[in-house]
Amino acid sequence: MAEAIAWFVIALYVLARFYRFRRTSLELAYAGLFVLFGLSDLRESYVVQPWLILAKGGVLAGLLR
């Protein structure tokens, strides 16, 4: 649960930075990906399923891009 909260806080930080400086719209995508990662951590705290691991890999690939 704490890990998910950390991802949500990071997403809020990225959104705040976007609204302050508005340098690139990629920050919106990053914030959305951090939220998705946090949501997947919440789901993972209850059950781990193969599709969830694949989805997390896709989100991670998007963040590393």
Image (spheres, rainbow, N blue to C red):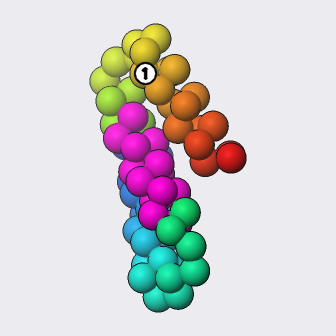
26 lies above or below 4? below
Q: Which residue is mark 1?
A: 52
Q: Is residue 26 visible?
A: yes
26 lies above or below 40? below
Q: Nearer the viewer, residue 43 or 55?
A: 55
Q: Quadrant of residue 62?
A: top right
- Give the magenta-colored segment's residue range: 27-40
The amino acid type found where label 1 is placed reads Leu
Q: Quadrant of residue 24?
A: bottom right
Q: Quadrant of the N terminus?
A: top left
Q: Give left or right: position of 42 versus 6.
A: left
Residue 58 position in % (x across, y down): 55, 31
The residue drawn where x is 52% and y is 57% is 30
- Per the image, label 1 sits on a secondary structure element best described as helix
Residue 40 position in % (x across, y down): 39, 34
Residue 62 in the magenta stretch? The answer is no
Task: Provide the major secondary structure of the magenta segment.
Answer: helix
Q: Residue furthest bottom?
A: 20
Q: Residue furthest right?
A: 65
The residue drawn where x is 45% and y is 63% is 28
Total marks placed: 1
The residue drawn where x is 48% and y is 56% is 29
58 lies above or below 64? above
Q: Is residue 2 visible?
A: no
Residue 30 in the magenta stretch? The answer is yes
Q: Residue furthest top?
A: 50
